[in-house]
Amino acid sequence: MIRKIKSPKPALGRWDIHMVADYCWSIQLTGDAPPGCLIAIMGASGSGKSTLLNVLTQRNTKDYIIDGEMMLNGVPLTPGSIKNISAYVQQSDLFMETLTVKEQLQFRAMLRMDKKLDKEARLKRVDEVINEMGLTGCASSRIGAASGTKKGISGGERKRLSFASEALTNPPIFFCDEPTSSLDSFMAQSIVQTLQKMALRGRSIFCTIHQPSSELFAMFKQVLILSEGRVAFMGSSKDCLQFFRDQSFPCPPNFNPSDHYILTLAIVPGQEIECKKKSAAICDAFSETNLAKETLEHIEEQRKDVDLYDHVVLDQVTGESRYASDFSSQVKNLFWRAWIAQFRDPMIFYIRMSQTLVIALLLGTIYFDTEVNQTGIMNINGAMFLLIVNACSTNLFAVLTAFPNEINLVKREYGTGLYKTATYFITKSIAEALCTQASYRPYFVRNRKILHRKVRLYYSHRVHTDHTDFFWFQDGAHEEAQDNFALVVEKKSPRIQTASLDSPNL
């Protein structure tokens, strides 16, 4: 049971998880998450940290058979309802690289916050979160690429931006997947300090963490240590030291406690049987402690006191729609972002324009002054065919190479209920079409005539100019069809190499 109320009583939960895959194993957990707590979930590789986080957040659970129940304020949670009252900050930070920090938060605010709030209230909340997360200094900076290929904000600022993006709706529960990964010690401490401040505002925060330094580990007041899918300890870090000492595994002086716990519970190759027996003995010993028994007693007490709990959070849990914004709002904001992404990263635009000019000059020279006779008509048909094939292939491969940078972001935003896939497809298609048409119409105005690759060829081929608009429309329709086709192929292909090989054949 997980709860977020003003009552000082802790919120408790119980999960019985059985994973079915190439092998079978089970996780049996009982734990509490009081408001204002920051819980570090630790354990060796394969101990069940990611599995626990997936089940608690109702993500990637298709291979799990889950028994038992999860509760909020004493009321069982329905599958997926945890998403309505929680936030999940994943290990990798995915953003649209061309947006600024403030624009990213404004985009999220328009799509994620309550429909009842007007634009002014949403923008005010954005400013509050920027101050809360310490992002004021980089609010107007572009996010950039995490790889460093595009200059942007630092790794610590990207992580705080991830927290800020989820904190806009002020969720009572946060799940964080290794937030200090790939950060130096200073940045890692800064992130944990941010988590502490968030917890002090009454949030319950679950945080998986891998090999924290001794200074970083000391910042966590509550720890959950897993071993072979079982709870080896859950409680304060101070009590954890005493518990392992009582089990004849004291932490050596001047030794990192987190390293000591993981080494004690680790399964050493060649000593699997002995290590598993030791791990099971520690888990059994913890289940008999007063701390574990009190947890079970609190669960039963809260089952009886459901009516005493605040029902505001429960209203959020039972909401039917997973989308906070309507269709028109999704279209408007997605198109705004797609348009900015197109013209703040003009490399593809310039490449398309250069290709257009080269092809126009090349074919215009080859087919210049074509006679209007039977032979000339065949030449004109050939020129039209080459133009259409070139336009389609150029668009196809341009989208195939650009879309992989967005697909993971789209999957994540769709998973959080930010927008529908159909809405993204529509807005992406419109933005691509406008950018394509703009790049294929570099104009040199003379006597009110626009030099376009087809128009140039129409005049040089002596095609009747009354049909120019029709050919422009036909060309645009072909290019738009190829853009959409490329999006579909990219979505269905496991890798960009596969999409590039399959698309010409299809």
Image: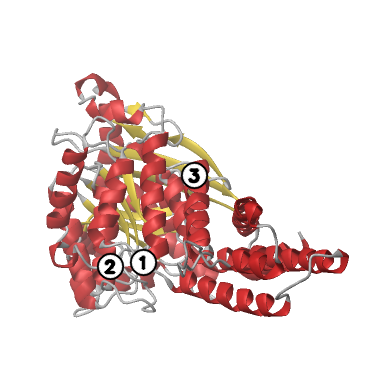
**Among numbered discs 3 and 2, the one appearing first in the sequence:** 3
Q: Residue 344 bears which disc, if any?
A: 1
Residue at position x 47%, y 54% from top?
431
* Residue type indicated by callout 1: Arg
Taking depth in this image into account, of 341 and 390 the one nearest to the observer is 390
**Quick check: can you spot residue 52?**
no
Q: Residue 17 bears which disc, if any?
A: 3
**Among numbered discs 2 and 1, the one appearing first in the sequence:** 2
Helix, strand or loop at label 2? It is: loop
In this rendering, the label closer to the viewer, 2 or 1: 1
* Residue type indicated by callout 2: Arg
> Horizontal placement of 308 versus 177: left or right?
left
Q: CA distance from mark 3 to mark 2?
A: 42 Å
Image quadrant occupied by the C terminus: bottom right
Taking depth in this image into account, of 345 and 321 the one nearest to the observer is 345
Q: Where is residue 153, by image quadrant?
A: bottom left
Q: Position of residue 475 (x, y in %)?
A: 64, 56
Q: Residue 142 bears which disc, if any?
A: 2
Image quadrant occupied by the N terminus: top left
Q: Residue furthest front?
A: 447
Q: Residue 135 bears which disc, if any?
A: none
